[in-house]
Image (tube, helix red, strand yellow):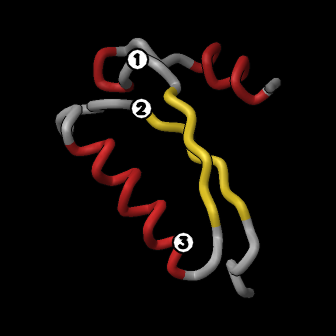
Amino acid sequence: MSSAGRSYRLGVLLGDGIGPEIVPVSVRVVDAALAAVGAGVSTRDLGGTASTGEFTDAVVRRLAER
């Protein structure tokens, strides 16, 4: 299945134990990789981090409703 013309949505948690400087760079890598195959990505900062317990099931449910 080709990714050309497809668009993806990506939820982003900053940090999560790997360091807040890593995630923005990783998002740029995903964006570039998808652009290389003709696909796009939109990102949404989900707020909080999983490693600190700020990200909960309630947040996931609320985001899924949007």
x and y percent of residue 9 in the render? 65, 48
User: In this rendering, would 50 be left or right of 39?
Assistant: left
Q: Is residue 47 above or below residue 31?
A: above
Q: Residue at x 75, y 29 (%)?
A: 64
2 is higher (above) or lower (below) than 40? below
> Residue 35 got which mark?
3
Q: Which mark is residue 13?
A: 2
- Whole-Å distance between the Cαs marked 2 and 3? 22 Å
Q: Residue at x 19, y 38 (%)?
A: 21
Q: Amino acid at mark 2?
A: Leu
**For mark 1, what is the residue?**
48
Asked whether the beta carbons under mark 1 and mark 2 sit within 8 Å of each other, the answer is yes
Residue 25 at x, y percent in the picture: 28, 50
The answer to which image quadrant residue 40 occupies is bottom right
Q: State which tag comes first along the sequence, 1 or 2.
A: 2
Q: CA distance from mark 1 to mark 2?
A: 7 Å
User: Position of 55 compared to 17: left or right?
Assistant: right
Q: Nearer the viewer, residue 28 or 2?
A: 28
Label of residue 17 in the image: none
Type of amino acid under label 1 = Gly
